[in-house]
Image (cartoon, rainbow, N blue to C red):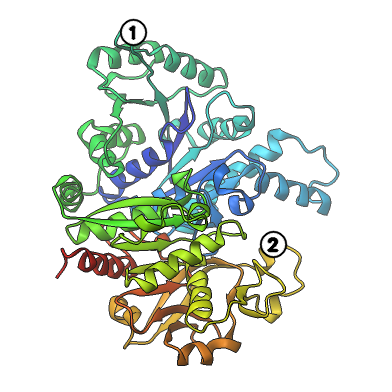
């Protein structure tokens, strides 16, 4: 039978359940188990695809085109596996499906209630993960904090699952926060006790407590938590805030979390965990390294989670080359006003990430212009490719009317536009190109040299495309179309012929970067940035 680990959060939000789930998944995978991780999100949106990055951080896209919570990025990076749409469930999806079934008459005129209809649908979706991904152990993270009204149906479903499949097949892990009182110099356990009491009031008793804190959690506090929360002493796992999230699996390993969980599930590890590569990663993180300065020009930089995968991909590529990347964030609306332009011109590399809408676009076009004119390595991601094309049309071809119809529907030269078959579709999702698509590479290009293969599969999330009407004109002027769809109809990668590294891609390579397998485009970009900085070879 599949084993299930349910993770809940207490005291405060953003306590680190996602990283905890991902790190524990790594601990179990390193012992030979097939692992999958699922996120249960209590919001009523069907998915985060139409939510503002200010509300929810980045939207992480999977191979199958699912727009999911950013925690799935953590999951994939830590366990080095591709997940699917069954791994992100929202209240909106649950209610939408149940209502559709009711309208269809599937319930034969019965009264539809939270229990059992909603909870049954939640349980069905949880068990769907093991069937579709052939997982031996499924970790399920419940979004929000215990006590939130919107989380109650999910928690009730988990309570029912424990009764139905047996306690020997489930583990409940409660991730909680220990606040520090500066006046007395103490960590306090009372909020954790109250949080566990709230959880127990709905019929769930945690088997393991992860005690999060900015300070060391000593044994006397662990003992107190164990006593008052009715868990074993070795099942109170301290988790002091780490300087790098990739330290967390080893913190769990050193504190015996893997051993505690397997004992509770009645499992024996298939082989001893091998952490050599992971320790090598951490050694690289903490060692002294030459620094490259990377300017990221975005629209949502107030919330760094909006570009979490970009940040991680930059770090992955830098670490494997023995470098440290210092990311300097620039708001594109500031660049529009001339603020920060002089500093941006001194960067070793510039990244323009994706986004939607016209706000701050001219700042992104300016960033591409700065990179082009100053021979600064440039990596344009999705929208970053499109503004690179706009810059080229305006300032190389000399046409001020060049634009995207996303920003100016009446532009005389729509170099970026909807495909003809997309026009007239009212549903925002209906015009999106989402998920994994093939890209055929020109072997003699920069892209071809960094990938070292003829064809790749990359994850997309965009609505507008390069307008092929302008392909010949741009090509003659020096813009190279080094990546295309296999049928040649869609431009996937553009690069500047007479530039050390100015590459824009219509897809999101950051979604496929891994700590020990950085994405080739980011690796090539960082190598070019190190040469610009005078520290590469």
- Asked whether the residues under the numbered discs 1 and 2 touch, taking CB atoms below 8 Å apart as contact, a structural biologist would say no
Residue 300 higher or lower than 477, as above or below: above
Quarter of image, res 380: bottom left
Give residue 65's position: percent from left, percent from top: 55, 63
Relative side of 176 to 332, left or right: left
Q: Secondary structure at mark 1?
A: loop
Mark 1 vs mark 2: which is more N-terminal?
1
Q: Secondary structure at mark 2?
A: helix
Residues packed near mark 1 inside 10 Å, few (<14), some (14 to 19) or many (20 plus): few
Asked whether residue 1 appears in the rendered view, the answer is: no
Relative side of 186 to 366, left or right: left
Relative side of 500 to 107, left or right: left
Residue visible at 47% across and 83% down in the picture: 484
Q: In front: 447, or 133?
A: 447
Give residue 205's position: percent from left, percent from top: 46, 22
Residue 479 numbered mark, or none: none
Quarter of image, res 367: bottom left
Residue visible at 17% across and 58% down in the picture: 322
Q: In front: 477, or 461?
A: 477
Give residue 60's position: percent from left, percent from top: 49, 55
Which residue lies most toward the top here?
184
Q: Which residue is mark 1?
A: 183
Q: Which residue is mark 2?
A: 428
Give residue 325's position: percent from left, percent from top: 26, 54
Q: In front: 191, or 241?
A: 241
Q: CA distance from mark 1 to mark 2?
A: 52 Å
Which residue lies most toward the right here?
109
Q: Foreground mark, 1 or 2?
A: 1
Asked whether residue 351 appears in the rendered view, the answer is: yes
Residue visible at 33% across and 41% down in the picture: 24
Q: In front: 187, or 496?
A: 496
């Amino acid at each position: 039978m599949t084993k299930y680990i349910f993770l809940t959060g207490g005291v405060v939000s953003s306590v680190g359940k996602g990283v905890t789930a991902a790190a524990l998944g790594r601990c179990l995978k390193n012992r030979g188990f097939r692992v999958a991780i699922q996120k249960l999100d209590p919001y009523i949106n069907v998915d985060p695809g139409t939510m503002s990055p200010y509300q929810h951080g980045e939207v992480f896209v999977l191979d199958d085109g699912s727009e999911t919570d950013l925690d799935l990025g953590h999951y994939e990076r830590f366990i080095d596996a591709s997940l699917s749409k069954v791994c992100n469930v929202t209240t909106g999806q649950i209610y939408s499906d149940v209502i559709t079934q009711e309208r269809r008459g599937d319930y034969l005129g019965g009264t539809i209630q939270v229990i059992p209809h909603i909870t049954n649908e939640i349980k069905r979706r949880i068990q769907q993960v093991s069937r579709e991904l052939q997982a031996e152990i499924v970790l399920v993270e419940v979004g929000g904090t215990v006590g939130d009204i919107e989380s109650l149906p999910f928690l009730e479903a988990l309570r029912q699952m424990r009764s139905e499949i047996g306690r020997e097949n489930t583990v409940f892990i409660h991730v909680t926060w220990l606040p520090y009182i500066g006046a007395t110099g103490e960590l306090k356990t009372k909020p954790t006790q109250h949080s566990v009491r709230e959880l127990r009031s709905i019929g769930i008793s945690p088997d393991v407590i992860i005690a999060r804190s900015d300070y060391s959690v000593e044994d006397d506090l662990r003992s107190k938590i164990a006593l008052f929360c009715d868990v074993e002493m070795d099942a109170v796992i301290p988790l002091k805030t780490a300087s790098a999230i990739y330290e967390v699996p080893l913190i769990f390993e050193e504190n015996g979390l893997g051993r505690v969980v397997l004992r509770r599930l009645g499992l024996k590890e298939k082989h001893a965990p091998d952490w050599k590569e992971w320790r090598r990663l951490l050694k690289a993180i903490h060692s002294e390294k030459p620094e490259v300065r990377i300017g990221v020009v975005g629209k949502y930089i107030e919330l760094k989670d909006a570009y979490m995968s970009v940040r991680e991909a930059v770090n992955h590529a830098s670490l494997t080359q023995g470098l440290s990347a210092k990311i300097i964030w620039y708001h594109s609306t500031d660049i529009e006003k001339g603020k920060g332009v002089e500093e941006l011109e001194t960067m070793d590399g510039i990244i323009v990430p994706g986004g939607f809408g016209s706000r701050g676009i001219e700042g992104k076009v300016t960033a591409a212009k700065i990179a082009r004119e100053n021979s600064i390595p440039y990596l344009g991601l999705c929208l970053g490719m499109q503004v690179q094309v706009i810059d080229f049309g305006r300032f190389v071809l000399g046409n001020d009317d060049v634009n995207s119809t996303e920003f100016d529907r009446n532009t005389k030269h729509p170099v970026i536009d909807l495909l003809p078959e997309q026009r007239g579709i009212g549903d925002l999702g209906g015009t999106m190109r989402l998920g994994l698509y093939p890209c055929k590479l020109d072997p003699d290009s920069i892209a071809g040299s960094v990938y070292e293969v003829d064809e790749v599969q990359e994850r997309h999330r965009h609505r507008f495309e390069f307008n092929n009407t302008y392909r010949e004109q741009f090509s003659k002027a020096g813009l190279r179309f080094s990546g295309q769809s296999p049928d040649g109809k869609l431009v996937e990668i553009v690069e500047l012929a007479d530039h050390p590294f100015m590459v824009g891609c219509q897809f999101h390579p950051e979604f496929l970067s891994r700590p020990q397998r950085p994405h080739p485009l980011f690796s090539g970009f960082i190598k070019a940035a190190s040469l610009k900085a005078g520290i590469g070879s």
